[in-house]
């Protein structure tokens, strides 16, 4: 009897993603529920597994068995934790908010338990919760949950296969953010675990394929080829991984200039995608085929493939349509058909303007809402100030009346104390005046801080607007100029003009510089990955052979409000800019640290320094911006000379929200 119970427990502990023999498996689990001799815990687990088994084919049965499992769980917190996990699975596709609530309840109920199965379910619950956040475009939160919750719990569960999937998830997030080197690190960890197994499971083909795609983006072709060969035995005919495999193979052959092999691989992927009527996959494979034909110089077949995509689009992303229109304009120009090239260039510009107008309309509505909110706050503040002044006047009037009456009575009773009372009354009046003056100073200071805050907010909004205008407006114009120059350069009746080719190279450099300026005006990495990552990128961008920057970040909280993170980033950016422009320094030490609500910035350079007494720090625009941002965060700013040689030390103390 004991061996039978142990066998049942081992079977029920298996991950629900395992392959099951259909009806026989369901009947076996149902028999466990109806057998009177089985304990409630066995019946509860059988109900949960049956709920998961039916979830993809019959939601009514799935819900019935989920509630059956809950009934047999009773007041057992561990089983109730498993119930909430499977409830999250049930609501995952139909009610994401309820699914997230169920996953959080699961982790809370299982938190006191530390055996391997508890860690396994906690890891899966956190992972599924994070994937729901990813579906809402919150990839930063998903990455945080993976690294801080899922992976530590998976390691404690001892499940190597699940750990490999977690590392692959992290790699995919970095790959989607174009951070291919970081993605490669995590893909290597995931594949290292799979390669250590006697035979990698067929279900893990996607890990090899996604890692191959990342390597192809990095142009690491030798390493990509090894993964292509490794993933081949894991393919199931007609499956989505098979299509992605042949896409990767087609890209590899194109990058190695084996164009016929590239076309053969892409045609195989295209046939499989069409057979499954996967329209979006079909379109992506056709676009890769277009790129191969274009590189081969077969412009007419390439054009025909791209026209098929444009005439029957499946992608919902306007960015893809922009790319298709631009490519059509360019290929028609190369073929000498300028009428068609102009048509598609115009379609490209119209779509780009449409997208810009939508963004502009949203920005105007947002600014209007902010304006109304600011006006309401200002009116409330004015009414509050008037009310406070009125109350203060009433209190002062009552106080003066009481003092006059008291003085009169006191003068009548004891005349000899009149002078003493008069002197005390004058002292009290002076104190009231000083207090009133101090109140006015405090109000004036607060108004100055509010004005500075509004100016800084306006500067950031203007930076953001200019960055978008540079990227969308001027970038589009430069693309049109490049298209026209490409047509002139490809004219077979003209001799190649070196000046024209030099102008096109300068135009490419201008586009790169434009993107760098737009990125510097509004750093996207700050919005995605926070203050510490953006500071590291800023320092790396400013370093050169003649300037070394040593950045030390200590205990910076990732949850600082974005307004405060942006102010700190701009302070550091202005300090480093001053060093690069004026200090002639070779070494810079920058330290940013946080202790609860205190944020400290220390910058030390070995440059030529400056005369603090003669230099007017108040008039410099850079220093003024720094002082305004420091005042906005209720901080202090101090410039000092280095003790051990030439150079400057800047100490800043800020108050932040925790």
Image (cartoon, grey):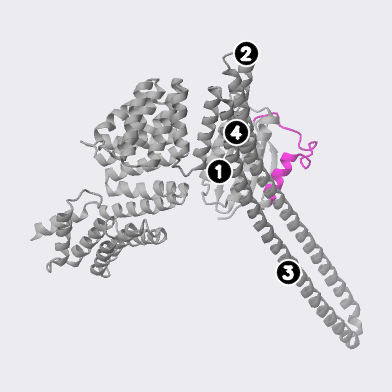
- Please state if 181 lies on the left or on the right of 424 as rendered: left
**Residue 453 percent across, percent down from the top left:** 69, 52
Distance from Cα at disc 4 to Cα at disc 3 = 47 Å
Residue 528 part of the magenta-drawn span: no
Residue bearing the label numbered 3 = 384
Which dot, 1 or 2, sits closer to the camera? Answer: 2
Q: Residue 597 in the image: x percent, y percent?
A: 58, 54
- For the magenta stretch, what is the residue range? 606-631
- Label 1 Cα neighbours within 10 Å, binned few <14 / some 14-19 / many ≥20: some
- Nearer-the-camera pick, 235 or 104: 235
In this view, the mark in front (3 or 2): 2
> Which residue matches tag 1?
526
Residue 515 got which mark?
4
Do the residues bearing badges 1 and 4 touch, measured as CB atoms within 8 Å? no
Do labels 4 and 2 touch, CB within 8 Å?
A: no
Mark 2 Cα-neighbour bin, 10 Å: few <14, some 14–19, many ≥20: few
Query: Residue 630 magenta-drawn?
Result: yes
């Amino acid at each position: 009897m004991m061996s039978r119970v142990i066998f049942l427990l081992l079977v029920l502990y298996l991950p629900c993603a395992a392959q099951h023999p259909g009806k026989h498996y369901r009947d076996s689990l149902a028999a466990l529920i109806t057998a009177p001799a089985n304990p409630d815990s066995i019946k509860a687990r059988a109900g949960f597994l049956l709920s998961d088994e039916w979830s993809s084919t019959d939601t009514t049965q799935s819900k019935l068995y989920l509630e059956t499992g809950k009934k047999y769980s009773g007041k057992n917190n561990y089983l109730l934790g498993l119930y909430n996990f499977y409830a999250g699975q049930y609501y995952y596709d139909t009610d994401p908010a309820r699914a997230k609530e169920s996953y959080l309840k699961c982790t809370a109920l299982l938190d006191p338990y530390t055996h391997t199965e508890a860690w396994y379910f906690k890891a899966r619950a956190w992972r599924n919760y994070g994937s729901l956040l990813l579906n809402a475009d919150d990839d930063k939160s998903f990455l945080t949950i993976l690294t801080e919750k899922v992976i530590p719990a998976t390691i404690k569960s001892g499940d190597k296969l699940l750990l490999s999937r977690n590392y692959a998830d992290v790699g995919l997030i970095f790959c989607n953010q174009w951070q291919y080197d970081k993605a490669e690190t995590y893909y290597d960890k995931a594949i290292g675990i799979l390669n250590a197994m006697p035979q990698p499971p067929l279900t893990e083909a996607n890990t090899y394929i996604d890692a191959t795609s990342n390597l192809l983006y990095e142009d690491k072709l030798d390493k990509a080829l090894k993964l292509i060969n490794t993933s081949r035995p894991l393919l199931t005919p007609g499956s989505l991984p098979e299509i992605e495999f042949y896409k990767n193979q087609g890209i590899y052959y194109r990058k190695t200039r084996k164009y016929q092999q590239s076309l053969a691989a892409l045609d195989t992927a295209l046939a499989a995608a069409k057979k499954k009527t996967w329209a979006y996959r079909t379109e992506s494979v056709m676009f890769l085929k277009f790129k191969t034909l274009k590189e081969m110089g077969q412009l007419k077949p390439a054009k025909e493939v791209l026209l098929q995509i444009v005439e029957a689009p499946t992608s919902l992303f306007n960015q893809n349509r922009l790319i298709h229109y631009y490519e059509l304009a360019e290929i028609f120009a190369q073929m000498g058909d300028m009428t068609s090239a102009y048509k598609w260039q115009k379609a490209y510009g119209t779509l780009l303007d449409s997208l810009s107008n939508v963004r502009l309309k949203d920005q105007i509505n947002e600014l209007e809402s902010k304006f109304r909110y600011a006006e309401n706050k200002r009116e409330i503040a004015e009414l509050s100030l008037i009310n406070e002044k009125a109350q203060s006047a009433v209190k002062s009037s009552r106080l003066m009346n009481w003092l006059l009456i008291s003085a009169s009575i006191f003068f009548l009773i004891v005349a000899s104390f009149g002078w003493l009372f008069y002197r005390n009354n004058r002292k009290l009046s002076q104190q009231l005046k000083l207090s009133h003056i101090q109140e006015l100073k405090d109000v004036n200071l607060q108004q100055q801080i509010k004005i500075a805050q509004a100016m800084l907010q306006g500067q950031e909004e203007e930076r953001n607007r200019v960055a978008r205008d540079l990227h969308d407006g001027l970038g589009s114009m430069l693309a049109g100029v490049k298209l026209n120059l490409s047509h002139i350069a490809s004219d077979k009746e003209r001799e190649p003009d070196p000046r024209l080719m030099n102008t096109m190279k300068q135009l490419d450099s201008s586009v790169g510089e434009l993107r760098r300026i737009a990125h510097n005006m509004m750093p996207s990495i700050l919005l995605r990955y926070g203050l510490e990552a953006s500071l590291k990128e800023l320092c790396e961008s400013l370093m050169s052979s003649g300037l070394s920057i040593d950045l030390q970040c200590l205990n910076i909280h990732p949850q600082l409000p974005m307004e405060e993170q942006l102010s700190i980033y701009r302070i550091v950016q202005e300090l480093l800019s001053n060093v690069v422009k004026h200090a002639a320094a070779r070494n810079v030490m920058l330290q940013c640290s946080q202790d609860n609500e205190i944020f400290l910035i220390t910058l030390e350079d070995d440059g030529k320094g400056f005369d603090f007494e003669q230099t007017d720090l108040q008039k410099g625009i850079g220093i003024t911006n720094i002082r305004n941002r420091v005042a906005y965060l209720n901080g202090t700013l101090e410039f000092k000379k280095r003790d051990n040689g030439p150079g400057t030390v800047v100490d800043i103390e800020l108050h932040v929200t925790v």
